[in-house]
Amino acid sequence: MSEKNENALDAMLKQYESNNQTYSKSGSAKTYDLKNYFNTFIKEGVKSGTKRVRILPTSDGSSPFVEFYGHKQQVDGDWKTFPCLKHEKDEACPFCEAREALLATGTDQAKELAKKYNARKMYVVKVIDRDNEDEGVKFWRFNHDYRKEGIFDKIFGVLQAVGKDITPVDTGRDLIITINRNQNNVPVVSNIAHTDPSPLSTNPELVELWTSDTRTWEDVYSTRNYDYLEIVVTGGIPVWSKDANKYIAKGSEDEPKSDGVESEVTMGVENVKSTIKPSTTATKTTETVAATNSGEEEDDLPF
């Protein structure tokens, strides 16, 4: 194994170990092309399936798994993820502020609701989807699982079994991803296996094209600004107002009733920023928190 490949394997193993230590308890819009994203969706009505990917090597021998912190919420049945401004930009983040305000109340109900605003660790890795190689390099984003039952844990099992870097251009290995629906009918990755060593491609031009892709997750996932996220956190749906030259809450008094608004619906969430309102939604809130913290791999769209 070359020194570069040894470094890559070492980087991946150290990253995994570092992210599984035991701790004491104590934007701008983009034009999206769905070809840029790999996901583990399976069609409605299909109970299981498999997908096959090849993780691309990095140019400097570092781990290909880029760590990322985001806030996940659900609206109209769809999961959305927003990069955390505090973790990713060292800026004020409405989600984090909401969490801190709820925790400051000191009540058990507030502490439970605050979990909805936690910044979740995730990973983004660049892959080639073997079933759609013509679509080029894709970004695969998945959750870190502190129970050690997530996708990264399953890939780590492959690394341990192989004992070598699985990303080299000439001798790397594809990953075979098995997807099944769980008891809630949600598609989850149940197993990840590996193939025998094989070239990334027998076409040198494709290898060069894929490995020279310099894009990062910031090129394909939007980081929204504070004002945009504040609307989301307070339960609104952001829409762009040409007249105001900023995002406003859909349905607000400031929203123009003419062509001056270009609707860009992203995420609406049932919540509060600094107080809790005792209501009939308490049961639903608890269920949502449980689902959010269950470690299940809810795929979402990049918008």
Image (spheres, grey):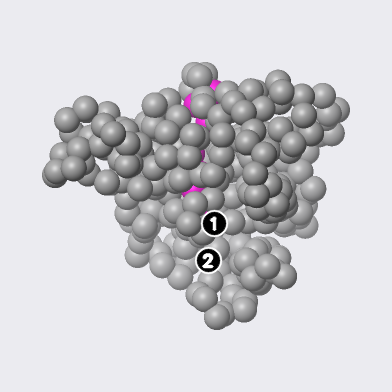
Q: Nearer the viewer, residue 110 or 129?
A: 110
**Residue 265 seen in this snapshot:** yes
- Check if mark 1's residue and mark 2's residue have beta carbons within 8 Å: yes
**Residue 195 seen in this snapshot:** no
Dominant SS of magenta comes to strand
The residue at the point 64 percent across, 71 percent down is 185
Query: Residue 29's x, y, as percent?
Result: 31, 38
Task: Look at the image and say whether residue 164 sits in the magenta stretch.
Answer: no
Task: Look at the image and say whether residue 84 sits in the magenta stretch.
Answer: yes
Q: Nearer the viewer, residue 293 or 105?
A: 105
Q: Given the image, on which type of amino acid does mark 1 rest?
A: Asp
Does residue 174 appear to the left or right of 160 in the view shown?
A: left
Does residue 203 appear to the left or right of 186 in the view shown?
A: left
The residue at the point 26 percent across, 32 percent down is 254
Does 31 appear above or below 69? below
The residue at the point 53 percent across, 66 percent down is 41
Q: Identify the element where label 1 is drawn.
A: loop
The numbered mark at residue 41 is: 2
Residue range highlighted in magenta: 79-86
Q: Around disc 2, counting alpha carbons within 10 Å, would you say few (fewer than 14), some (14 to 19), or many (20 or more)?
A: some
Does residue 169 appear to the left or right of 28 in the view shown?
A: right
Query: Residue 216's x, y, as percent?
Result: 43, 38
Q: Which residue is mark 1?
A: 299
Q: Given the image, on which type of amino acid does mark 2 rest?
A: Phe
The numbered mark at residue 127 is: none
